[in-house]
Amino acid sequence: MPEMIEYCEKIFRIASKVEKTCVDNPTMYMAEFRNNDVYFLEDLRCSGLFHDGCQRACRIFWKESWLEPVSGIKSEITEDSSIHSDEMDKQKLRTRQTDEIYFCQSTWLRNATKPLSAKEKIFKLFTDVKIGTYNIIEALKLLLFPLLRKLVRKIRDQHPRGNLTKTPEEVLNLQPGEVVEVRSFDEIITTLDKRGKNKGLLFDPEMKIFCGKRFKVRNRLEKMILERNGKMIEVKNSVILEGVTCECYFAFGGCPRKEFQYWREIWLKRVN
């Protein structure tokens, strides 16, 4: 993607090998890349600059053939190598399939991967432990927690749900760098409808662990490209918080993608 050009000829540490990833197209499932040769570099994310300002900030996937090892450790390289910053190079890279459908790593994941069976997910998890993505305790949790949750859900629904038919909204106009506190779970429940959503945005069960905690606002979320159909949508009164990502505690075998959670401003309060 043209957003990746700014990282060319620069040095980064490998964060992890991507043995598997979640794919949301048309529904959520776990898959592996076809040649199993993809890595994450530190926490490099897409700026969305060349996709009309998409603010999802997806983590970028890097093929092994796009990388080369370096001897020794450097903090940065000189700025003499600027050939890849040429605007002409960026214009050559594809960003749309049609006028309405965008083209990026996220929207093309279904084509670049193949679904994993339950047995393959377990095998992948053992590989993750072997290469250091997870330790033994984390791996056991990623096997047992999803199974336990599935068992509990047969007894009673664990999904946060409210009682509203029309949900409220709050305009805080939060800006990057501001400190906020996530409201209590009981407060958030009062903003949700019977599907567990506020104005169409789901309050995911994994988000409950952040209630009562404080974070900095990373960026506002006003528009984003949907992975499942490649269309840009507008988002109102919502933000992304620094370091608050999906950890996939309830996804069997886990996923290292660390997608950001999306927060309605009504679920937050400013900290003076």
Image (cartoon, rainbow, N blue to C red):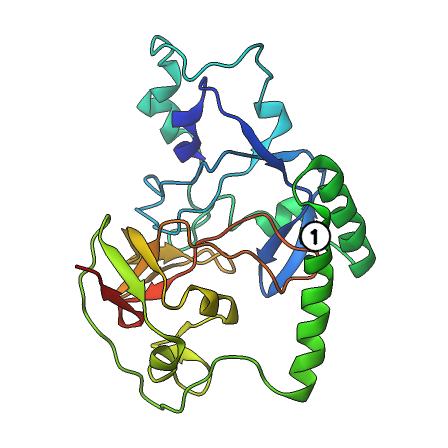
Q: Residue at x 36, y 30 (%)?
A: 91
Left or right of 159 on screen, residue 199: left
Q: x, y (%) of residue 172?
A: 18, 66
Q: Residue 237 occupies which quadrant of the picture?
A: bottom left
Q: Secondary structure at mark 1?
A: helix
Q: Is residue 111 left or right of residue 53?
A: right
Question: Can you see residue 46?
Answer: yes
Q: Position of residue 109 (x, y in %)?
A: 58, 48
Residue 37 higher or lower than 99, as above or below: above
17 lies above or below 251: above
Please tell me which residue is depicted at 79% across the width and 60% down the height of the picture: 118
Q: Residues within 10 Å of mark 1 (few under 14, many from 20)?
A: few
Q: Nearer the viewer, residue 268 or 79?
A: 268
Amino acid type, residue under disc 1 in the picture: Ile
Residue at point 37%, 56% (across, down)? 224
- Tell me, yes or no, if residue 235 can be seen here: no
Q: Nearer the viewer, residue 115 or 249?
A: 249
Residue tagged by mark 1? 137
Q: Quadrant of the C terminus?
A: bottom left
Does residue 102 appear to the left or right of 24 in the view shown?
left
Give the residue drawn at x 59%, y 66%: 27
Q: Position of residue 205 (x, y in %)?
A: 51, 71
User: Where does residue 198 sit, x and y in percent of width and height?
Assistant: 36, 77
Q: Quadrant of the N terminus?
A: top left
**So how many labels did they put on this image?**
1
Q: Is residue 169 above or below residue 270?
A: below
